[in-house]
Image: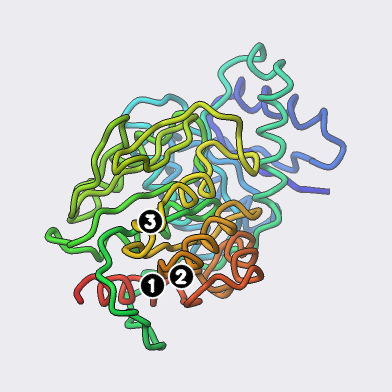
Amino acid sequence: MIKILLADDSLLVRSILKDLFSSANDIEVIGEARNGREAVDMTGSLRPDLVIMDIMMPVLDGLAAIEEIMASCPTPILVLSGALDNREVNQAFEAIKKGALDVMEKPVDMFGLDLPEVRERILNKVRMLSRIRVIGHRHRRAMEPKTELASQGTERTMLVIGASTGGPKAVLSILKTLPPDFKGSVFVVQHISNGFAAGFAGWLNRESRIKVRLAEEGDVPRPGEVLVAPNHRHIVLQDGKIALLDGEPVNSCRPSIDVFFKSFSLESCRHVVAVLLTGMGRDGAEGLNEIHRMGGLSIAQNEQSSVVFGMPRAAIALGGVDHVLSLDEIPGAINKLFSR
């Protein structure tokens, strides 16, 4: 049985969520916190498998509560954002920076939850996050890679990054190390809840020294610029330009990392450094293998530093990974490769 702690100052929201979880025979709400201080205390005493956290709460807000929980009793946390305006979304990503695993939009009424796909999406998210073992939040300094990187005598001009669960903070830790005059063009495909891609790009842009924005149809890769895949669309590189497609989900994902990685031609692959980070499932594994096969350099995050080792593990099993590095080692590897 998955034990859930609800932390929200709204009785209505807590009632809606309890009704939702009552329909699942494997999920139990074991406590309700009305403010951040209660959330911290109840997490320590009840030891839930997952905390569903609001940000705007009295006494102690959600951000401070997350920080205390991750310091004293590390627990998986799902943040529910009350609105998709800039302030709420910015705070949601600050919550991820402090240790929350993921963000979703808060259900505002029962009508939306009557839709089977909406209910199933929330239930599946809860089931997935509750299985993740989290550790206390720590700030780490980027390290140099321990292994010698094979340059293969090729100039690297494109950095492509794929990530899923646990990815936003991992992606940020890499982009923050890139200098303003970074010589490569950068692409990020992050599996993220509907409506949060633009906020994710804006958050990365504020936290990084390099320009980050949401990718648009017809964009041309430019050195020193990061393009982030939007919600609901596959992103591909066609004839040197970005195209956004409305195809069916691949690996249950749209955007799909595999779709993007596989869109590189033989010629462009030779100039690519591809990085596959933490995530559930296997999206990106075949694409990373394809980039490796066509002459690109492939890096997978190691198990010890991954929140979920699913996607990197699948890529390693295919035999197409040049280097398996910790999250601390990846930034040094990237900067070394692109400084040559």
In front of the other: 293 or 56: 293
As measured in the structure, the alpha-carbon distance from the residue carrying label 2 to the one carrying label 1 is 8 Å
In front of the other: 90 or 334: 334
Q: At 74% from the left edge and 21% from the top edge, which residue is drawn?
A: 116
Q: At 46% from the left edge and 64% from the top edge, which residue is drawn?
A: 294
Q: At 61% from the left edge and 46% from the top edge, which residue is drawn?
A: 51
Q: Position of residue 329 (x, y in %)?
A: 39, 77
Q: What element does badge 3 sit on?
A: strand
Between marks 3 and 1 in the image, the one whose residue lies nearer the viewer? 3
Name the residue type under label 3. Val
Comes first in the chain, label 2 or label 1:
2
Name the residue type under label 1. Ile
Q: In the orientation shown, which residue stands out farthest toward the top?
A: 111
Q: Which residue is mark 2?
A: 299
When the figure is inspected, residue 154 is found, relative to residue 80, above or below; the finding is below
Where residue 156 sits, quadrant-wise, is: bottom left
When the figure is inspected, residue 163 is found, relative to residue 118, above or below; the finding is below
Q: Position of residue 308 (x, y in %)?
A: 60, 61
Comes first in the chain, label 3 or label 1:
3
Q: Which residue is mark 3?
A: 160
Count residues near mark 3 (Cα–Cα under 10 Å), then give few for <14, some for 14-19, many for 20+: many
107 sits left or right of 57 in the view? right
Count residues near mark 1 (Cα–Cα under 10 Å), then give few for <14, some for 14-19, many for 20+: many
Comes first in the chain, label 2 or label 3:
3
Q: Which residue is mark 1?
A: 330
Q: In the orientation shown, which residue stands out farthest toward the left?
A: 181
